[in-house]
Image (spheres, grey):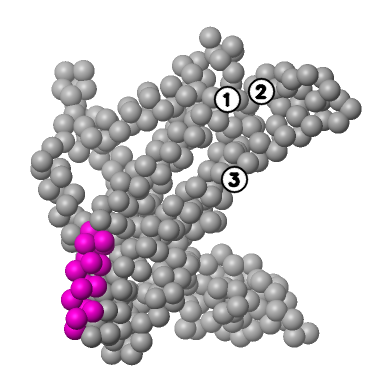
Amino acid sequence: MKQIKTIVLLFLISFLPLQLWSATEESAAGGLNISEIVLEHLSDNYEWHIASYKGKSLSIPLPIIVRSSATGTWSVCTAETLPKPFFFDAAHHGKIYEQMPNGSHVRPLDLSITKVVLQIWIVVLVLLCIFGYCSRWYKHHDEKSEAPRGFVGAIEMIVMTINDDVVKGSIGEKHYKPYAPFLLTVFFFILMSNLIGLIPIFPGGSNITGNINITLFLAICSMIAINVFGSREYWKDIFWPHVPTFLKVPVPLMPAIELFGVFTKPFALMIRLFANMMAGHAVILSFTCVIFLGWSMGVGFGIGLNTFSIIMLLFMNALEFLVAFVQAYVFTLLTAVFIGLAHPQAETE
């Protein structure tokens, strides 16, 4: 246990110089715009910016794939070679727009590989490597005679905890098996996205779960799993709940409230994950920028704010390391609970 704590502490401390280095580019450029740094990190982009040195930017160009709304032709390029009439609209967070022949601006069909998309692929690749390694171990070992240890044992412990305590415990032994693969996939995807997002430079640093589009998609998937496969008793309780009749006719007050709850449950999942992860990244970046802001105010402010910011950075990294697991666990647990509510216990027994 002490070795695990030491490894985690060294892991978090190693992030500090990377975070400081990633913020020096703005201070060296002659000005530190904290809000711009934070918003740039939280937003999606058509290139992966790594660092800047002496006014030169080191970035990984990503492929831009857009379809013209005027001509119907496809264009494949990078941010530096974007052809006309396409342009980046600063008023819409740098998204690509197209100028039509009549002078209007429209949003073309955009299938570009953005920073968030590439980060998702990296997360998927890491998960494939992890579970490919675990499956190879089980293929060459008899788990009945030899229990897994080390990394494989840790992964098995996490899988069994989520499967037995969260999925089976919330949904019920009769109905949990069809939902277990989905819920385990959601848990490990969110967990790995959060952990890789803590790494401030490539191949990490992109705040996937702090992107409202990603959490919206996860919420829609949860909504489908909850409602599409819900039992007849579940839908009967929504449209004809067990309440006094005057609450159902002539004004369907309670059915309207219950139907509204069908949409508020996934909405709560979406906002909770998005807000927590976005806030954590914003706070870490803000404390990083405070270091350089203090030095710009003088040596005295620099020493004091430097010490305070480093302590807070270490604390916030440790907290975000915990939040990475907690948010994945909470999203999976609440989804499993909502699915369990769609299968009343009277049917599961």
User: Between residues 308 and 317, which one lies in front from this camera angle?
Assistant: 308
Furthest residue to the top? 349
The magenta stretch spans residue 164? no
Magenta-highlighted residues: 299-314
Instruction: Based on the picture, tell me whether residue 310 belongs to the magenta stretch.
Output: yes
Circle nearer the N terminus (2, 3): 2
Q: Residue at x 23, y 79 (%)?
A: 301
Q: Quadrant of the N terminus?
A: top left
Q: For this rendering, which residue is in front, 222 or 129?
A: 222
- In the picture, measured across the screen, residue 298 lies left or right of residue 34, that is left
Q: Is residue 118 visible?
A: no
Along the line of sight, which residue is nearer the eye, 146 or 253? 253
Q: Which mark is residue 56?
A: none
| Label 3 SS | helix
**Three-letter amino acid code at the position of disc 2:** Tyr
Q: Which residue is mark 2?
A: 234
> In this figure, which residue is indicated by the disc labeled 3?
267
Tell me the amino acid under the disc marked 1: Leu
Of label 1 and label 3, which has the lower sequence position?
A: 3
What residue would you read off at disc 1? 341
Determine the image quadrant of residue 247. top right
Q: Does the CB distance between marks 1 and 3 fall below 8 Å?
A: no
